[in-house]
Amino acid sequence: MSLIDPNVDLLLQARVGLTADSAFQTAWPYPSWIAHRGAGRLAPENTLAAFQVGLDHGFQMIEFDVQITADQIPVLMHDATLERTTNGEGPVWAATAGQIGQLDAGRWHSAAFEGEAVPTLVQVAQWMQSRGVLANLEIKPAQGLEAQTGEQVASVAARLWSGVTPPLLSSFSVAALEAAKAVAPGLPRALLADVSRWAAAKAPFEAPFEAILRTALGLSAVAIVIQHAGLDADRIALAHSAGLRVLTYTLNDAARAQALLSMGLDGVITDAVDCLGPGARSG
Ligand code: G3P
Ligand code: MG
């Protein structure tokens, strides 16, 4: 049976059939192991303390989540609201960067990290570039602010990472990635997707993985980042034949990670920075 769904549009059909080597249009400077939110669960997520723990475990690339404040400053925050990971409250979009900068983003995790701050993207760029650590910048827009967040985050990122290896911009939001492409076309993009959710919500009449590939190609993305349960050897090969690198999130099982890497997977985003990755025997 063909791997290609007959309904896949012409763009995808034109790209598949190329060999993997000739299909890749862009250099791939990124390592195979990426620390999720800095250091997974070992330190408060999306803080510079977590980044340091990830680096201490040998990770040369870090995934982090970025959204914008009321005054349009990109800051690191996963949730739409401040309650879970800081001592503040309310939506991130409703607070200024000055207000968020006063918050404690470490105490919720453990006493050892009390006083840790919510970093701005400016601070993160400085930290990463001074240490040679690469970025997977996940654009995490609040509902209704998808395009605005994509535009603002990408334009700031393009200024901050000028002349160095760029951050890999990723997002579940197609609108955010479209806005990022418009304002900073030179920054590489990756479409984040959970195949099972995509099937139900976005493409009920199209084979979901092919729909994800088609959408990624429409964004001129260089990669897809897929929830790990949705990957197998055929899908990795199909994405490669379409010229897309394949990463997975958030994978904490060593055997599964090694199996996917042996199938050609290009990157693993993991919480298990003390068990998997460059510093671990299994890595
Ligand atoms: O970027 C991969 C992963 O971080 C996506 O899920 O919710 O942890 O941001 P989440
Ligand atoms: Mg994330």
Image (tube, rainbow, N blue to C red):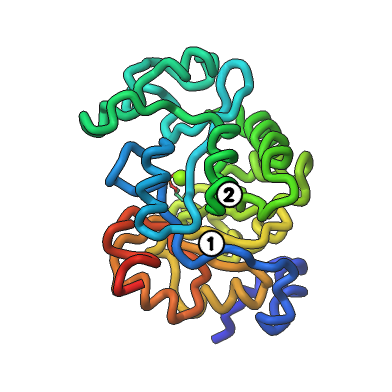
Q: Which residue is mark 2?
A: 170
- Please indicate whether residue 110 sits to the left or right of residue 249 in the image: left
**What kind of residue is marked 2?**
Ser
For residue 280, side relative to residue 245 (left or right): left
Q: Which quadrant of the rendered structure holds the N terminus? A: bottom right
What's the CA distance linking mark 2 and mark 1?
19 Å
Mark 2 touching mark 1, by CB under 8 A? no
* Type of the residue with mark 1: Pro
Residue 208 numbered mark, or none: 1
Q: Residues within 10 Å of mark 1 (few under 14, many from 20)?
A: many
Residue 227 visible: no
Note whether ligand 1 is within 8 Å of mark 2: yes
Give the answer, above or below, for where 16 lies relative to 106.
below
Quarter holding residue 175: top right
The residue located at (60%, 68%) in the rendering is 245
Q: What residue occupies the far front of the structure in this picture?
A: 130
